[in-house]
Image (cartoon, rainbow, N blue to C red):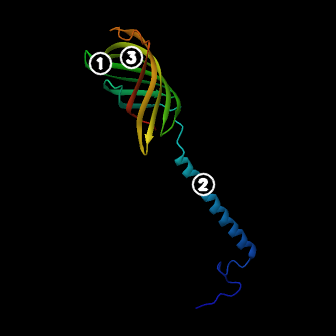
Amino acid sequence: MKVLDSEESFWGKSFKNKYIKNILLIIIIVSMLFGNVVWANEVNKECKPKDLKNVSYPEVGLTTSLLLISPNLGYWFGPIGIRLSGMYLNENNNEVHFNLGYKLSDNGKTQQSINLLSGVIVGSDPGADYNYTYLGVAYGLNFSIKKYRGFFIEIGIAKVLHDHLGNLKDDPFVPCGTFGYIYRFTP
């Protein structure tokens, strides 16, 4: 077994000069630190949700307004979007909804929007029959639970434009809203 002398060290015989050893140590340390900073920035880019407020994409889903379960089709043209939903079961049980929305915020996990609503509702519940058209405003939230995204809730208030049965004449404003699942095909 060979014993290293004072000039032959960990670096070998070719690095006898102290200055060269120090420069190499500094280069190694700086490259390790710089490499860690670059790696940390890449990790943060992946963890930080991408801003999608000005991005266009389609969406599709199923929601309910407690009368019927309705399919939804929508498209966001940057910050402005449209959504059409509805279901025709029979002449006494149908509804159509049209939304014109504006994104307040949007990323891969959540989307918040303010929406103008218009629609027709024909149906009944145990307390009354309904047949009216409306125009309203609502807040929409599309959010994630754990790693599953697409859960949707929309809550607002609407003005009854025309009540075909006359049972809402004392209620010029009615609550409106839907909840369900809308998948956003974000890039």
Residue beneath label 1, please?
124
At numbered mark 3, what does the secondary structure look like: helix, strand or loop?
Answer: strand
Residue beneath label 3, please?
119
Q: Is residue 8 left or right of residue 181?
A: right
* Residue plotted at (33% across, 27% down): 71
Q: Mark 1 and 3 residues: CB-CB less than 8 Å, in contact?
A: no
| Label annotation for residue 38 | 2
* Residue plotted at (65% across, 66% down): 28
Front position in the image: 184 or 155: 155
At numbered mark 2, what does the secondary structure look like: helix, strand or loop?
Answer: helix
Q: Foreground mark, 1 or 2?
A: 1
* Residue plotted at (45% across, 37% down): 143
Q: CA distance from mark 3 to mark 2?
A: 52 Å
Q: Position of residue 60 (x, y in %)?
A: 37, 31
Front position in the image: 160 or 140: 160
Q: Position of residue 78 (x, y in %)?
A: 51, 29
